[in-house]
Image (cartoon, rainbow, N blue to C red):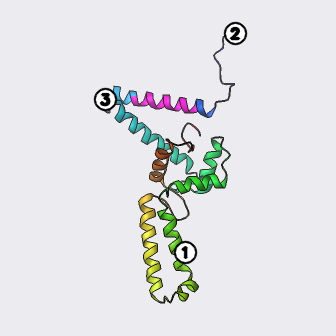
Amino acid sequence: DDFDDDDDDEEETPETKEEKEKSRMTGEAALMVERGEVATIHEAQAIVDERTLEKTFLEIDEDGSGLVDTDELRSALRSMGLAATNADVREMQERMDEDGEIARWKRAIRALEDKAALTKLGLGAADTALLRAAEAGLGELLEARDVTADWQFGMEAYKVMVRKERASDVRLPSAAGM
């Protein structure tokens, strides 16, 4: 027929996929309100958004470790059609440390691990205790931010990152893009 509605031959653009995903999410939220699961559309949208972020994180976490590493993040970006370089991925990871606190802790630990430098400063046995205290402090910070020392991140860190990035030009992997 001349009036076939079969648009399957056309390749979906990221924008088209994103619009479809927004439409799906809006529909799901509306159904939640209609079924009486929540009182307002705002509540429903927040729940749907949370579920969508969790689903996307699980898709990105290819090995099921509960953490997304650099390779998994790069793979997710490539699946969205983005030619992510190591620098792009590193920039995204560093956004998790927007105040530079993780980087400062890592530098301090590296300095404390440099025995020669510590000896020059006249530090002796106390350096081990200082190093352990610094490592514990970094560990607490990383745990609070749901990030590991080698920039793997968990689901909660992913949610924070996505919510921050929504207001910027950087495109993080989303259910619509994968």
Residue drawn at x 29%, y 31% as measured from the top left: 39
- Amino acid carrying label 1: it is Arg
N-terminal of the pair, mark 3 or mark 1, is: 3
The residue to which callout 3 is attached is 36
Q: Secondary structure at mark 2?
A: loop
Q: Nearer the viewer, residue 4 or 134?
A: 134
Of the residues tagged 2 and 1, which is closer to the observer? 1
What x and y, as percent, mark residue 90? 60, 56
Residue type pointed to by label 2: Asp
The residue that appears at 44% across and 27% down in the rendered structure is 27
Whichever of labels 2 and 1 marks the residue nearer the N terminus, that label is: 2
Q: Give the residue furthest to the front.
A: 121
Q: Secondary structure at mark 1?
A: helix
Mark 2, residue position: 2
- Amino acid carrying label 3: it is Gly
What range of the chain is rendered magenta? 17-29
Label 3 residue SS: loop
Give the image location of residue 46, x and y in percent.
Answer: 39, 38
Separation of marks 3 and 2 at Cα, in angstroms = 44 Å
User: Which of pointers 3 and 2 lies earlier in the amino acid sequence?
Assistant: 2
Coordinates of residue 68 in the picture (x, y in percent):
55, 54
Q: Residue at x 66, y 48 (%)?
A: 84
Q: Write down the residue under mark 1.
A: 110
Determine if the magenta segment contains residue 76: no
